[in-house]
Structure formats: C-alpha cells, structure tokens
Image (spheres, coloured by chain):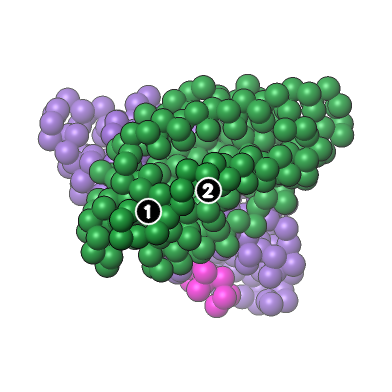
Chain colours: A purple, B green
Amino acid sequence: MPSDPEYLAGAVDLLGILAYGALTAFERLAEDARTAPTLADKVQIAQLAARQIDHFDRVSERVSQLDSDVMTAMRPFHAPFDAFHAYTAPKDWLEGLLKTYVGDGFAADFYREVAAFVDADTRELVNEVLANEPHADYVVARVTEAIRADQRVAGRLALWGRRLVGEALSQAQRVAADRDALTSLLTGTVDRPGLDLAAISRMFTRLVERHTARMARVGLQA
Amino acid sequence: MPSDPEYLAGAVDLLGILAYGALTAFERLAEDARTAPTLADKVQIAQLAARQIDHFDRVSERVSQLDSDVMTAMRPFHAPFDAFHAYTAPKDWLEGLLKTYVGDGFAADFYREVAAFVDADTRELVNEVLANEPHADYVVARVTEAIRADQRVAGRLALWGRRLVGEALSQAQRVAADRDALTSLLTGTVDRPGLDLAAISRMFTRLVERHTARMARVGLQA
C-alpha cells in the first residue's frame, strides 16, 4: 500500500469518482434498457449496465485495499455527478445511447490519462476496467444507423453531444477546484513529479480532441 | 451436444425460461435500485441486478452451444413473464425487496428440481448459477428489519408473498400447458425415464413447502 497520505487521499478520490461514475452509469443504462425499442437492444444495454457494476465492484475492492470505504470515497462526488445527470437527462432512447457512447468514451480517455499518476496496483485496475469495453461497436452501429435513417437526427445529436461535454467539463472543473488531493495527484507535490498547468491544459485539449474523433466516427460534428 | 430432438427442444425451452427470467429480474431490480432508500441499498440491489445479466450471459452461451438462438428461445416466455410482472408490480421498495427474495428463492428451487432432468453440461450451468447467490442474507436482513420496525408491515407482506406465489404458479401452469417438449423433459418419453403425474405434484408440493420456509425465515406466514 502506498504510504504518502496526500497521494493516498488523491487516489481514494479518484477511485471514488470511478465508483460513483460507474454506479450512476448503471442507473442511466438501466433506464435506457427499460425504454429500448427491441428486446435485442434491451439485452445489449442491460449487459453494458451490468458491466458498470463489475467496474464498481473492482474499484470498491481497491478502495478497501487502501484502507478506505467506498461509500465514504464516493460522497464528495454525489453532487457533481447527480448535477451532470440531472442537466443531461436524455429526451429519448437515441439521446441516451449517444450519452453512453460519449460518456463512456470520455471516461475511458480520462482513466487513460490519470493511469500514469497512480500506483502500479491502481493502474492495473484501471487498465482492466478499460480492457473490458467490447460494446462500443454496438453503440456506434446503432447511432450511425439512426442518423442514416433520418438525417435531421444528426443536427440534434451533434448539439446534444456538445451539451454533454460542456456539462462534463463544467462539473470536472468544480471537482478540481474542490478536491486538492485529487488535483495534486496530477500536478504533483514537492516530492512527486507531476504536470504543470500547461501540461494539464494539454491533457484537456487531448480529451476534447478524442471526443471530436469519437463524434466523427458516428458521423457527427463535435 | 445431446441429439434427441425432443430432449433438445425441452432443454432449449428451459434455458429460454432461465434467460428471460433473468432479463426481467434485471429490469425489476434496476427499478428497485432506482427507488432504494439509501445509497448502500442501491449498491446491493444494483449488484443483484448485474448478477442477473451474468446469469443471462451464461445461459445464452449454453443456448448457442445447443445450436439455438437465445432471442428465439425466450420468445414463448415473454407473455407469461410479462403477465407475471404486470400483475405483481410492487407498490413500494419493501414489496420489491420481498418480490426479489421470494422470486429468486422460488426460481432457485425450481432450477434445483429440473437440474436432475437435463444433460451434464446444462446441469453444471444450472449449478454454477445457483452457487452465485451470496446476497440473500442482505435481503433477509432488510425485510426482517422493516417488519421489526413496524409490525403492521408483516400482514401486508404476508399477503403480498401469497399473491406472488399464486401468480407464479398460475403462469407456470400456463407454460406447462403450452410447451409439450418442456413438460416431457420432466415427465420423460418412451426412451427416457421421467416423473409421473404424482411425482410432478410432489415436486410442486416441495416448491410450496420451501417457499413457506423462506417466508418463515423473515417472520412471515405463507
């Protein structure tokens, strides 16, 4: 177990974000499964939902190994995640699907970025969670199909994608401002090297670029 | 792969029931998770929901091994399961919890009874699914606690439990009447030994007895 208390606090914060993110993603996907247009879609979305609980369980186990409690670790992130989901409630199944695609993709990119700053065991966990994402193809196929079937859908979904990322970034900013230990995980401390502000800004640029590529993949302008 | 076509049809029916049962249990549990009174309850119920998808995935894989398609295998059971859930929509979180307890318990007992009549690979699958049920303790504790906190709850839940089993048996009867291959899995054929009508009736008696014991465990009269 890593012993630097500030590092530990940052790592537990990060795991708290992953855990609560997975739990709220489960809820959202379960709701999408309920309104899926076909039983085959329902199955696919239910499988995605179940995978979020698998992520939650793995993260939760890692939090215990760090002598913390997952319920406590998640608490600081209830407000930002709940606000994000409240501000981005999908109007229909297709918006829900794009939210899954954009949200999971963004989350995965973020995991990749922070994996460099955590201890080896936590990094391994993050990589396992990332490796476990075989369903993106289904989401891509379904969104692409819907856009092809009705071109007017594209404009609406493009706007929706922008709104999702805008809200995500605004909540991320709120978290960064509130959680010093988490921020110092990225920026480093006297004893631990980290990113300077320019490097953090480049990281955000990369996240937005990857989001743009992801939108392009389904034929949407970011 | 077993070659007797009537046996195969019965086994695929059975797997179709398990698959669609798991899928509808997922939906019900996801809805319960949404209305859970605390985040800790939400986590527990979400984990139960995710486990149903794990069951679905295993059953689905076995259906493929038997050269059938799970979507097709589930189709005959949409109507009875959907009717069961429509007639037993929980009024509150506690009724949902008892439905989980009674429903999963009843399903597990039914799996145990039919496991004797299927091929070794399918039996192994059934046993794996049964072994994977560590959460009953949580449900028992929560229901017992709610009854202790308010004795009037007991009468209402006892009635509710009776209604659940009544509806389940009525839908089971409908399935048995409709699906000859499934019924002959239990009753046997000229070439394969099975249960006679008296033995099937004893099986139903055992299922009801175990339900009674399950209700007694949470302090409810069946």
> Three-letter amino acid code at disc 2?
Ala
> Three-letter amino acid code at disc 1?
Gly
Q: Tell me where residue B146 appears, x and y as whole percent.
A: 80, 33
Q: Quadrant of residue B118?
A: bottom left
Residue that numbered label 2 is attached to: B199
Q: Tell me where residue A165 appears, x and y as whole percent.
A: 39, 41
Q: Nearer the viewer, residue A192 or A34?
A: A34
Q: Nearer the viewer, residue B61 or A109?
A: B61
Q: Are marks 2 and 1 in contact (CB under 8 Å)?
A: no
Q: Which quadrant is the N terminus of chain B positioned in?
A: bottom left
Residue at (32%, 41%) from the top-left corner? Answer: B180
Position of B60 with respect to B44 (left or right) is left
Instruction: Classify 10 Å Cα crowding around label 1: few (below 14), some (14-19), many (20 and above).
Output: some
The mark that comes first in sequence, 2 or 1, is 1
The stretch drawn in magenta includes residue A116:
yes
Residue A210 visible here: no
Residue at (48%, 60%) from the top-left corner? Answer: B116
Residue A146 visible here: yes
Residue that numbered label 1 is attached to: B188
Q: Are marks 2 and 1 on the same chain?
A: yes
Magenta-highlighted residues: A115-126
Q: Tell me where residue A182 appears, x and y as whole percent.
A: 62, 58
Find residue A44 and name its label. none
Q: Chain of mark 1?
A: B
Residue at (33%, 34%) from the top-left corner? Answer: B178
Instruction: Classify 10 Å Cα crowding around label 2: few (below 14), some (14-19), many (20 and above).
Output: few
